[in-house]
């Protein structure tokens, strides 16, 4: 049984993950951390992480960037592995994550979906075959109308996965409206759509002469990210200090 502390337990993802852990026979919610205790959780909730004295095997963080520094200090002090899902960290915070990983196991990923992370692995192989054969590569991502950043971090991760196959020789192009020229070979186009309540939709298009191959991933709810986080916590519990990612979780399950 993997005992988990949920950092940010009363947020949307915190509540999704709480439900997933409750339904998973291999995990147990040891405690929650949140700035507010709304009193409806079936586990102890601490409004100050420093007051949390509950034994656990891993912490899942879905909070806010402002809360990450204190959370890292807590995990290092407790020797507690951490699944870090909060995004928007500063360069200084990313350095702190790197330093903390020398003392504890930390898993950090741009997207916690198992499907997206499997796709990242598949794209490397596909790009290695198709790009040299003259296929152009384009990424189209779609999200809800409340998302403020574009392109999505996942779209950039997909592009980076492809680009790593070619020593980062490809340029990312986000807008063609001001360009009047033939499409260069060494570029990856990335387009963003914002509308409605789309949770997350990513298409990676390989367009060649007379044929098109498209890799697609659609998230129908935030639960896909929560499921990945729980799988990551199971994987990380008991691991040696270091930086891990979802590719390690997938490799361990193969």
Image: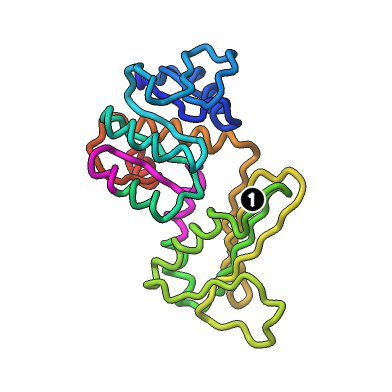
Q: What residue would you read off at disc 1?
A: 201
Task: Estimate the x, y position of residue 151 in percent, counting from the top left.
Answer: 60, 60
Q: Pick the residue in front: 136 or 225.
A: 225
Task: Estimate the x, y position of residue 29 in percent, counting from the top left.
Answer: 44, 19
Q: Residue at x 58, y 55 (%)?
A: 152
Q: Pick the residue in front: 76 or 162.
A: 76
Which quarter of the rendered picture does the N terminus lie within?
Answer: top left
Q: Is residue 107 left or right of residue 118?
A: left
Identify whether 244 is placed above or below 14: below
Identify whether 10 is placed above or below 250: above
Q: Pick the residue in front: 213 or 112.
A: 112
Q: Residue at x 43, y 18 (%)?
A: 31
Q: Is residue 248 left or right of residue 88?
A: left
Which quarter of the rendered picture does the C terminus lie within?
Answer: top left
| Residue 105 part of the magenta segment | yes
Identify whether 180 is placed above or below 123: below
Other residues around mark 1 within 10 Å, as few (<14) / some (14–19) / many (≥20) = some
Task: Estimate the x, y position of residue 68 in percent, counting from the top left.
Answer: 43, 39
| Residue 209 part of the magenta segment | no
Q: Is residue 198 left or right of residue 226?
A: right
Dot 1 falls on a residue whose secondary structure is: strand
Q: Pick the residue in front: 185 or 92.
A: 92
Q: Residue at x 73, y 43 (%)?
A: 197
Q: Which residues fall within the magenta stretch?
A: 99-123
The colour scheme is rainbow
Query: How many numbered marks have been drawn onto this rendered protein structure?
Result: 1
């Amino acid at each position: 049984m993997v005992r988990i502390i949920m950092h940010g337990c009363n947020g949307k993802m915190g509540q999704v993950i709480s439900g997933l852990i409750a339904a998973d026979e291999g995990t147990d919610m040891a405690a929650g951390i949140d700035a507010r205790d709304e009193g409806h959780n079936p586990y102890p909730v601490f409004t100050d992480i420093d007051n949390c004295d509950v034994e656990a095997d891993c912490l899942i963080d879905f909070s806010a960037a402002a809360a990450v520094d204190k959370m890292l200090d807590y995990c290092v002090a407790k020797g507690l592995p951490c699944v870090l899902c909060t995004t928007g960290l500063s360069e200084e915070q990313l350095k702190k994550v790197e330093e903390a990983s020398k003392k504890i196991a930390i898993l950090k990923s741009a997207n916690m979906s198992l499907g997206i992370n499997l796709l990242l692995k598949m794209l490397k192989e596909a790009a290695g075959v198709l790009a040299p054969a003259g296929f152009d590569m384009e990424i189209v991502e779609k999200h809800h109308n409340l998302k403020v950043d574009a392109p999505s971090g996942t779209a950039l991760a997909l592009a980076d996965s492809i680009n790593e196959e070619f020593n980062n020789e490809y340029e990312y192009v986000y807008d063609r409206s001001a360009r009047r020229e033939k499409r260069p070979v060494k570029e990856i186009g990335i387009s963003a759509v914002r509308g409605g309540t789309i949770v997350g939709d990513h298409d990676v298009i390989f367009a060649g002469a007379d044929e098109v191959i498209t890799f697609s991933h659609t998230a129908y709810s935030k639960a896909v990210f929560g499921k990945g986080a729980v799988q990551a916590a199971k994987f990380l519990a008991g691991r040696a200090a270091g930086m891990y990612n979802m590719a390690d979780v997938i490799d361990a399950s193969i």
